[in-house]
Amino acid sequence: GLAAASGSPAIRLTQYRSLEEKGSITRDTRPEHADAEGAHSAPAAGGNTHDLTSVAAARLARLGAGESRFAWPAAAWLADRFDGESAALAIARLNRAGLLPTARDAASRDVRWRSPLRFEPARALLTRAVWESAPASRRLAALLALVRAQPPGTIDSLCALAGVSAADVARRYQALADTLTRRGAAALAARAPRGWRPADGFQRGVCLAHSVRMDRGYLSRQAADELAGLRARGATWVSLTPFGYLRAADDPQLVSSADAGPDEETDESIIVAAAHAHGLGMRVWLKPHLWTRGWVGELAFSPQGWDQFFEDYREFLRHWAILADRERIDGLFVGHELASSTRLHPARWRALIADVRRVYRGTLTYGANWDEAAHVVFWDALDVISVSLYSPLASTPTRELRTLQSGVRRALQSLKPISVRTGRPVLLSEVGFAPTASAAVQPWVEGQGDIDLETQRACYEALVEGIDRELWLAGVFWWKWFTARATGGERDGSFTPKGKPAEAVMTRALQAWEGRPVRAAQR
């Protein structure tokens, strides 16, 4: 029913070798898009196949599709593909986890940000339900009613516009969801992430930070080269960090970087970086962060504000949980240094964790700040305790090794009782020091004061000596290493050890920790 009009020119399809190449030419890093020039396709992120949803989108555009929230989902339905996997697999993942929107929700307009990984498959399913509920002679008209312009925001008004029964569409939607879930169940079971367990050994990790700009960020060739360099230095794990943004610490409205544009930490950039890491034999943590002016550990909302925050954060977290499961990412952080929220709302965090476990089948943790970890009461709901270890090592600036070693031992011994109490190992998910004279006093600060490479190196040496004593640690992730090639060096005042004396300390430690076991902490 979607044949081209007689005499119309063929659709032009341009295929690119990579998302970076596609983005550099079109400024669109999605695997597929369509524009006035035709269809554009790169291999589905992390893979080597093309979905060709763009061809269906270009054909719909020829038939009159416009700025409708159903235009791209309709193309995905026709291609039967979602970001490198079949519709059956995508629907099965959502439906089994209870995350597939109802037909009524799929019909609604977006008032706040909602994950496209939930709503695009749902709207594709609703489009198919409308098509199959219409008489054969009216199907094309019903489809075009959805995609020509933005349709109404209720299922009743939307179906009235399409000339079909809302009750019939809702029933068909549910029947299709159940059928596709059964069809995709076996493939879904075979694609579960391989979570980490203590028997897998010590995690030798580095936090890979996105350098803002497409040509040097997560999906770039530069990032792939930096990952290869980290693997050669002895790293076997890497963490990747997408973001959510709050305008202020008292403003609960959250905006995700998931679809923020080609220069940001988009879905496709995270997927490409994870695929490069997996291709090198490395394993991956997905560690979403929130960012605001000030520190996210001090969020302060009204009761209604906390309600809105957790509603938005749940959608944000669901998004990354779906992506992590689909891309078989090894571990997922449910949060990072959100100290005020964990202190005030532990029950809500338990509910979030349960929600994530319904869809994500890998290893789960929460990244507590060093002075927050002892107060987190939901460690039992997670697999690993994770801590950003920025504990002060001294009360006054120093690079004296014995003083620093004593500070490291105090910091680690403060974490050991948590491991004993919960029966879980502790992952140092962020450790690092900026090259300043005060690094041991305020390890969380960078960019203040003259560069002092030797103090940074001494703090690294002390940290490694302390870590070597404690086999109840699950691993260490050094903060941080940028994706861009031209970063670091002896004139750089950021946390990165690249090109500084601390890099040699990090490399020796990563290599020395090969084969290191992880054991339960003992009283």
Image: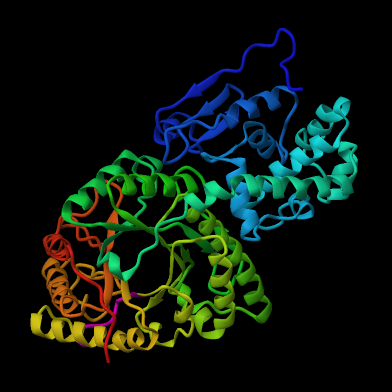
Give the image location of residue 241, x and y in percent: 41, 58
Residue 353 visible: yes
Depicted 129 relative to depicted 247: above or below: above
Quadrant (top left/top right/bottom left/bottom right) for the N terminus: top right
Left or right: where 352 falls relative to 236: right
Magenta range: 387-395
Q: Main secondary structure of the magenta part?
A: loop
Residue 258 visible: no
Which picture quadrant has residue 431?
bottom left
Give the image location of residue 198, x and y in percent: 31, 70
Left or right: where 405 falls relative to 266: left
Q: At x 34% / y 83%, what residue is drawn? A: 419
Quadrant (top left/top right/bottom left/bottom right) for the C terminus: bottom left
Q: At x 75% / y 51%, what residue is drawn? A: 109
User: For the view shown, which residue lies furthest in the top direction?
Assistant: 7
Q: At x 43% / y 47%, what residue is drawn? A: 271
Asked if residue 496 is among those painted magenta in the image, a careful observer would answer no
Between 265 and 476, the one lying in front of the other is 476
